[in-house]
Amino acid sequence: MTTHRMSMLDASFLQSETAENMMHVGGMTIYKIPRGTSKTFLRSVVEDFWSVPKVHPPFNYRLANPDNLHALRHSWIEEEDVDLTYHIRRSALPAPGDERELGILVSRLHGNPMDFHRPLWEMHFIEGLQGGRMAIYFKMHHALIDGITGMKMMVRSLSEDPADTSIQPIFATPPSKRPSRKPRDGVDFTTMLADTIENARAQVGTIRDVGKAMSTVVRAVRGKDDLTIPYRAPKSILNGRITRGRRFATQQMELAQLKALAKRSGGTLNDIVLAICSTAIRRFLLDRNALPDQPLICMIPVNVRPADDPGGGNAVGIMLASLATHVEDPVDRLNEILESTRRAKKHLQGMSRQAIMAYGALIMTPFGIQTRLGTTGRTRPPFNVVISNVPGPANKLYFRGAELLATYPLSIPIHGQAFNITLQSYADTLNFGFIGCSKTVPHLQHMAVYAQDALQELEQALA
């Protein structure tokens, strides 16, 4: 039986799993079913998926030790016989289902724990949406996948040709292979020595880069640098303890509109996104008389994969920035965000990908310890909210002729981080996925409405 040792970063997501802190991620995609399509279209798709003869990695991976999630090390076992009728399910909304009903259903599905004795993924086909649409909700444990890998897997299962029905399900296709090294004739000791020296040099470089980065953090702690650092975030209702209940909401915006604002402001697309999220969060907290006097701080995951990396596991660093939620004027708020992200990018500039990952892990170590001790949500948070932007496909895609209209990511609320925002670009749109604890952050769906209002406010202010 084939086994695979799990990285320490991936294993940390299992070690953090509790009844409330469910460490799976997800995605919801919405499709327009072509006119004239058979009413049994979705049933046929599900039955085809059930009949796939072989499930490929990582979709056939199950835990070697599912009864001890808090073990220090974990391994995957390749399951020979995956029960696809368990992993692939069909649901329906009372027709005609609207976005609110779809959000409620997906919230409930995302709030269900995974079965750790099986491969850690599920796919739910949802029919009954008004306007001849259907949805697919997909979830996997974060120990198995990150956002970049998930996007690449999704694209592999879709086609740019609406007439193409040959594309196989993502679990039925072998994973992408890294280019194999050219075989060597005999043992080249000179090359082996050079490789050893180069690896040692890289390790020394990583230690040096992390040391420089931490010295800047120390200067910021002493007030000698304006870098946004962890544990300077104010206490907020967004950082309380959570329950198992989840609430999911979505918003879609035009990329061209956002890019025009970025150009007008002198910032980037991500800066505009942060400003929109900041304004929405500020209004949400003002409605509840819960806006802190200090600015909220966001954590931004930084992808450090090479462009040709096929994915798998997790490879991210972190960047912290002020959301300037204490500033009333939208333009002044945006300018403070621009300055904060500029300093954060400069802080990481010149660091190797290994150093960025090591620095991020070091910064997050106290939060990890708090999580293990169960004190998160009761003490000062390292940051207030995670805002992550995952790049997606630039062209229109189709699933067996059904046009992909939108793709919305679902991330992980945990104790101390009861709410977060993840975005995915697709074709000419940017899609927001708002996820949080339904009790700690009630009426979270208002955040999606406020985000649209924030876009209009920023357009008027920068006109």
Image: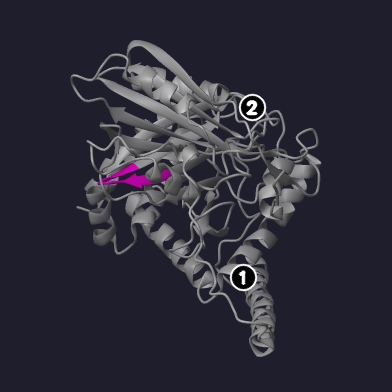
User: Toward the viewer: 427 or 181?
Assistant: 181
Q: Position of residue 104 (x, y in %)?
A: 46, 20
Q: Position of residue 196 (x, y in %)?
A: 69, 82
**Image position of 19 with respect to 140: above or below:** above
Instruction: Estimate how packed mark 2 is, as few (under 14), some (14 to 19) or many (20 or more) residues with alpha carbons within 10 Å.
Output: some
Q: Are marks 2 and 1 in contact (CB under 8 Å)?
A: no
Mark 1 burial class by Cα count in 10 Å: few <14, some 14-19, many 20+? many
Q: Which residues are magenta?
A: 423-430
Q: Residue at x 56, y 46 (%)?
A: 145
Whether residue 326 appears in this view of the structure is no
Residue 47 visible from this viewpoint: yes
The quadrant of the image that shows the N terminus is top right
Query: Which of the 4 image quarters holds residue 29?
Result: top left
Looking at the image, residue 305 sits to the left or right of residue 276; the answer is right
Q: Quadrant of residue 358?
A: bottom right
The residue at which mark 1 appears reads as 355
User: What amino acid type is highlighted by mark number 1?
Assistant: Ala
Q: Secondary structure at mark 1?
A: helix
Where residue 364 appears, as percent x and y from the top left, is: 67, 55
Q: Residue furthest bottom?
A: 190
Circle 2 sits in a helix, a strand or a loop, which is it?
loop
Check the image and tell me how it is coloured. Answer: one colour
The dominant secondary structure in magenta is strand
Would you say 93 lies left or right of 246 here?
left
Query: What's the residue at 76%, 38% (across, down)?
Result: 69
Q: Which residue is mark 2?
A: 113
